[in-house]
């Protein structure tokens, strides 16, 4: 775990540097080096510690399911953070950039799947507040697919994940009222996508705060008032988040 935590520290440092770059050029070499470290750490795990339904059930039966799930939630979250900057460059013709963008999506998918599996496994539910933050980040990756993908199966899968993630966030919010901020952050992000698809995934100072400062609200990326308005809904810490809110979130039609 010390090695994994060190990788996480380096990922955060890399994202800070990337956000400070004026030309927003992806830091491919740095990402490649950290990718090798992350992949090597996961590959070094013995078979009985690999991510599989049988291993999850085995550890859950011993009362260790939450720990097992937490390890993989960490791996997949670090991976999606490491590759996140490449979502902005997803439409480029650079095969390396496209590869990392796809890996970001894969990490987000695996993170969602681990959360679902843990919640569906008795004695393994991961109802702690940090899950809310990493699930919001994974949900923004699903929004990227809804906005930019042209494969109907990928779009349908992303929509399904986004719907389920929203339901889980509502459940987590009952346990951790502070997760109101996570819900607000997701809706503010959605608002940024509607206003400007072209810049919504650019790794700048705003995006860096969104990815890392999970316990704080974020301002509207494109200016405006401080009520975090999305569509016709004004979001405050006491707001109700319901199916109507989900319908708005799933609407990815950009402004003309």
Image (tube, grey):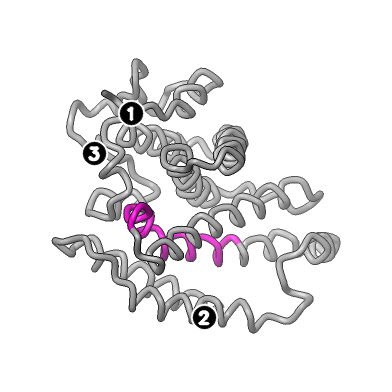
Residue 254, label in figure:
1
Residue 84 lies in magenta, yes or no? Answer: yes
Q: Quadrant of residue 24?
A: bottom left
The residue closer to the viewer here, 140 or 127, is 140
User: Left or right: 30 with respect to 35?
Assistant: left
Residue extent of the magenta highlight: 73-92
The residue under label 2 is: 2
| Prevalent SS, magenta region | helix
Q: Is residue 175 visible?
A: no
Q: Is residue 151 visible?
A: yes
The residue under label 3 is: 221
Q: Residue 98: x percent and y percent? A: 42, 61
Q: Find numbered disc 1 in the image and state the secondary structure of the residue it sits on.
A: loop
Counting residues from the start of the chain, the first of labels 2 and 3 encountered is 2
The residue closer to the viewer here, 48 or 160, is 160
Q: Which residue is rendered at x = 44% and y = 71% of the image?
A: 8
Q: Is residue 105 above or below residue 52?
A: above
């Amino acid at each position: 775990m010390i090695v994994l935590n060190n990788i996480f520290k380096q990922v955060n440092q890399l994202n800070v540097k990337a956000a400070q770059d004026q030309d927003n050029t992806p830091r491919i070499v740095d990402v490649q080096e950290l990718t090798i470290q992350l992949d090597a750490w996961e590959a070094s795990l013995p078979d009985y510690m690999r991510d599989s339904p049988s291993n999850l059930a085995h550890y859950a039966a011993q009362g260790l399911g939450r720990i097992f799930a937490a390890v993989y939630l960490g791996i997949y979250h670090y991976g999606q953070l490491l590759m996140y900057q490449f979502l902005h460059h997803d439409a480029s013709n650079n095969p390396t950039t496209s590869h990392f963008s796809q890996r970001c999506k894969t990490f987000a998918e695996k993170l969602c799947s681990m959360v679902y599996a843990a919640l569906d496994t008795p004695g393994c539910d991961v109802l702690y507040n940090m899950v809310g933050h990493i699930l919001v980040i994974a949900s923004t990756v699903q929004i990227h697919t809804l906005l930019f993908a042209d494969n109907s199966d990928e779009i349908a899968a992303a929509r399904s994940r986004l719907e389920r993630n929203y339901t889980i966030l509502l459940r987590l919010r009952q346990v951790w009222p502070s997760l109101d901020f996570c819900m607000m952050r997701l809706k503010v992000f959605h608002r940024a996508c509607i206003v400007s698809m072209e810049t919504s995934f650019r790794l700048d100072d705003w995006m860096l705060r969104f990815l890392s400062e999970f316990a704080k609200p974020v301002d509207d990326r494109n200016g405006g008032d401080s009520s975090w308005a999305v569509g016709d809904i004004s979001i405050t810490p006491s707001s109700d988040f319901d199916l109507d809110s989900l319908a708005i979130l799933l609407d990815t039609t950009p402004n003309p």
